[in-house]
Image (cartoon, rainbow, N blue to C red):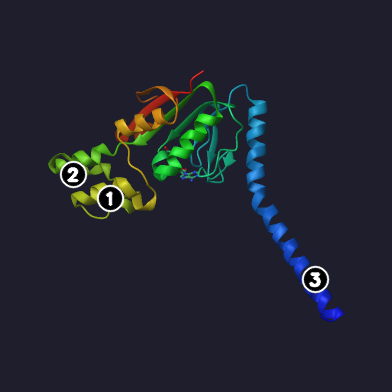
């Protein structure tokens, strides 16, 4: 290789390397920002109450929100480990979020909530009750069509499509819950005193009450 050719190749390789490094830095920036924000909340607040998947809504009563949407306090993909250190969060809450994860990702997310919670902290969840639609399949004459509220997910008025509605929700849902499997998942994630709970107006959305089940568990001390 001549000198000129050598210089050209070396420059190209260098630029490629720098470009790659710049891309790595850019892609890591949002993650670093989320970790920094989480650390700030931990430092500034006597107790961090963390709401998963709040959407664009402001955190209720001082809850810190974490969601893939930009309006959240912490912009984050919940398929990745939470940006909080171990045992730094007092309580975790989620409403109509857990059903958006495939089973294995859900197990990992619940285990990670357990990791970030302080001993004695609670994990509280509200999820859509899929048993409503299973009962409807078995007793179609009793089904109230207002349960099919999200129109993009309504495929037809056949009974099987009522099940498709809750199972897939136009591609948003990946897992179905009833009371039994919700309690089992929380127990298997290491929470104790796992039980169903009533609607709680301080955190739960009234608009979701008709279609929801609620559960809570505690990280042992
Ligand atoms: C059906 S909305 C629920 C919003 C609100 N919590 C409620 O009860 O109405 C589901 C929320 O979960 C969030 N979500 C779903 N998958 C997510 C993921 N992998 N990472 C972060 N947020 C996610 C969505 O952005 C959305 O805000």
Q: For the residue carrying disc 1, how many other residues have a C-alpha within 10 Å: few (<14), some (14-19), or many (20+)? A: some
Residue on which disc 3 sits: 10
Label 2 and label 1: CA atoms lie apart by 11 Å
Left or right position of 77 against 167 = right
Q: Determine if residue 24 is in view.
A: yes
Give the mark, 2 or 3, whose residue is nearer the N terminus.
3
Q: Are marks 2 and 3 in contact (CB under 8 Å)?
A: no
Residue on which disc 2 sits: 137
Disc 1, SS: helix
Label 2 and label 3: CA atoms lie apart by 67 Å
Residue on which disc 1 sits: 164
Residue drawn at x 29%, y 48% as measured from the top left: 165
Residue in front for this viewpoint, 80 or 75: 80
Total count of labels:
3
Residue drawn at x 64%, y 28% as measured from the top left: 42
Residue in front for this viewpoint, 45 or 104: 104
Residue drawn at x 19%, y 49% as measured from the top left: 159
The reply to whether the residue tagged 1 has its Cβ within 8 angstroms of ligand 1 is no
């Amino acid at each position: 290789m001549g000198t000129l050719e050598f210089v050209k190749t070396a420059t190209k390789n260098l630029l490629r390397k720098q470009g790659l490094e710049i891309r790595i830095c850019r892609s890591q920036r949002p993650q670093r920002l989320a970790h920094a924000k989480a650390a700030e909340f931990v430092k500034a607040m006597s107790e961090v109450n963390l709401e998963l998947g709040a959407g664009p809504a402001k955190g209720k009563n001082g809850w810190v929100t974490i969601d893939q949407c930009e309006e959240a306090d912490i912009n984050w993909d919940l398929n990745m480990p939470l940006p909080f250190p171990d045992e730094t969060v007092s309580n975790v809450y989620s409403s109509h979020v857990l059903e958006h994860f495939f089973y294995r990702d859900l197990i990992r997310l619940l285990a990670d909530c357990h990791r970030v919670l302080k001993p004695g902290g609670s994990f509280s969840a509200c999820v859509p009750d899929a048993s409503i639609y299973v009962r409807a399949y078995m007793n179609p004459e009793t089904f109230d069509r207002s349960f099919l509220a999200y129109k993009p997910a309504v495929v037809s008025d056949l009974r099987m499509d009522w099940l498709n509605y809750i199972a897939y929700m136009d591609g948003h849902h990946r897992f179905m819950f009833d009371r039994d499997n919700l309690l089992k998942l929380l127990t298997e994630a290491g929470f104790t005193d796992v039980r169903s709970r009533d609607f709680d107006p301080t955190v739960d959305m009234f608009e979701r009450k008709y279609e929801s089940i609620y559960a809570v568990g505690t990280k042992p001390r």
